[in-house]
Amino acid sequence: MAAASLGAVALALVSQHVFDMQPCPWCVLQRLVFVLIALAAGVGALWRGPAGRSAAAGVAGLLALAGVAAALWQHFVAAATSSCKRTLADRIVSGLQLDALAPEVFAPRASCAEAAVDLLGVSYEFWSLALFALLALAALALALGLRRPHQG
């Protein structure tokens, strides 16, 4: 889960810095969610007990569901507007000062309409949505698998 999440952020950064596809606040928020999922997955991998691992999987799963919501909002609402200023995504990113701390990763540089681009005929937010959904399923499977009594 951590590798997939960090891979998604890496691909977003390549798209931004190599192919000049600049992110909007909702894109940046999804990057943040992927980083947080990677952190939760890392904590779960390092945690020794099943309760801790299950809790980390639960946190990762909730974050993945938040990512699904962000991707859907970006596609169906934000992409139809010319500005993303003062939206929830913009307030979260600027409130956490991520755009100042790591501008090359977390600074929004485009409006939501400008950031509406496709990769292989599929919008970026739907690629993100698909990965968030897979991560949510993986977290659920992991959490449920850890709660089952082990046979041995």
Image (cartoon, helix red, strand yellow):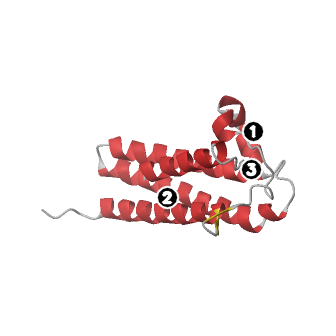
Dot 2, how many residues are within 10 Å of its Cα: few (below 14), some (14-19), or many (20+)? many
- Residue kind at label 3, given as amino acid type: Cys
Q: Residue furthest front?
A: 19
Secondary element at image label 2: helix
* Numbered disc in front, either 2 or 1: 1
Residue 124 falls in which quadrant of the image? bottom right
Name the residue tied to disc 1. 94
Mark 2 and mark 1 residues within 8 Å of each other at the beta carbon? no
Secondary element at image label 1: helix
Q: Earlier in the sequence, mark 1 or mark 3?
A: 3
Q: Quadrant of the C terminus?
A: bottom left
In the shown orientation, is residue 91 left or right of residue 128?
A: right
Name the residue tied to disc 3. 24
Secondary element at image label 3: loop
Q: How far across and down, in percent of the image, does residue 44 sit?
A: 38, 47
77 or 23: nearer the viewer? 23
Residue at image location 74% in from the left, 60% down from the top = 116
Q: How far across and down, in percent of the image, does residue 123 sit?
A: 66, 65
Q: Distance between the residues labelled 1 and 3?
A: 12 Å
Residue at image location 31% in from the left, 59% down from the top = 146
Q: Distance between the residues labelled 3 and 2?
A: 24 Å
Give the numbered dot on residue 19.
none
